[in-house]
Image (spheres, helix red, strand yellow):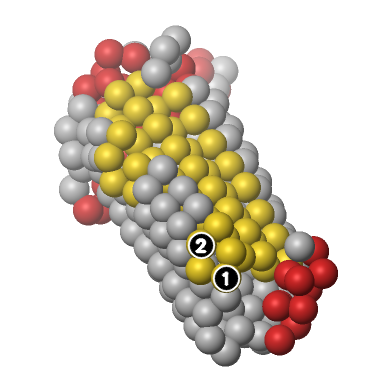
Amino acid sequence: MKLTRFMDEAYHGAARSKKLETRRGRMIFSLEDLADLVGDKPTRAEMEALVPSDDALLSKLISTEPSGRHQLLWGYLSSIVAERSAGPLKLASCNYAGLELRRGTIILQAAKDHVGERMSGGRIFIRGPAGDHLGQEMSGGGIVTQSCEDYAFRNMLGGFGVVLGSAGNFAGLGNHGGRIVVRGDCGARAGWLMHGGSLRIGGDAGEYLGILMSGGKIMVRGRTGKRAGWRRKGGIIQAGSFGPETEDGVMELAQRLA
């Protein structure tokens, strides 16, 4: 008889369950320890199954900037800690802060890339500039930042994003829903492939605004760059004034709505 079978029969399966509990309850002192259990690219469910319940330890794990291979782990942990916190969570500037955030509040002095990615609830306030892919694929909640780089709110499904200053290129690319407000200027190709939702720009917009859009609404208080609405299939674009080579249908629709 094998030893494992003998132990199971002798202890009625308790030995095997104890081994499983030992693995699940393995002491975690660093992101490296956590990565040994879940790998470098875990799902949120895998993280929640093994994340420590000790809030002090969790706070320690997110207190330092992670290495490149541990950024996703850090991002999930930042959201889990924020959701458990009674008040706002203040964090350093790291990639993936607020990854898949569901509730709670995160405050950042500045932000790097992929902040608020796939978030479905909660709030993220960034007191300085943000990097690329801010709020990418978010479906709920809200983000407020001073400024941002490229691809902000790409493939957005819901929620809101507010940029108090200027935004880079490709803001609202592939947007399906939600509300985006840029109080300053916006770079090139904002609202590219937009399907729904709204994009408001308080300043000027770069070239190819709303290129290939099929739905949604874009409103620009200032002037658009050249070729606004190029190959537009649907949706609405309104602006204070339009740049050269604007799609004819865009200007006709804007005049009817004025």
**Distance CA(mark 2)–CA(mark 1):** 7 Å
Q: Quadrant of residue 131?
A: bottom left
**Position of 128 relative to 251 (above/below):** above
From the image, tell me which residue sits under label 1.
241
Graded by Cα atoms within 10 Å as few (under 14), some (14 to 19) or many (20 or more), the crowding at tag 1 reads: few
Graded by Cα atoms within 10 Å as few (under 14), some (14 to 19) or many (20 or more), the crowding at tag 2 reads: some
Percent x, y of residue 17: 49, 23
* Residue drawn at point x = 54 percent, y = 48 percent: 181
Percent x, y of residue 50: 42, 30
Can the viewer see residue 193 in this picture?
no
The residue under label 1 is which amino acid type?
A: Ser
From the image, tell me which residue sits under label 2.
222
Q: Is 56 on the left or on the right of 249, as rendered?
A: left
Q: Is 20 on the left or on the right of 12, as rendered?
A: left
**Nearer to me, 128 or 131:** 128
Percent x, y of residue 152: 45, 57
Instruction: Please tell me which of labels 2 and 1 falls first in the chain.
Output: 2
The residue under label 2 is which amino acid type?
A: Gly
**Position of 174 relative to 147 (above/below):** below
Q: Is 141 on the left or on the right of 144, as rendered?
A: right
Kindly check if marks 2 and 1 are in contact, taking CB atoms under 8 A apart as contact.
yes
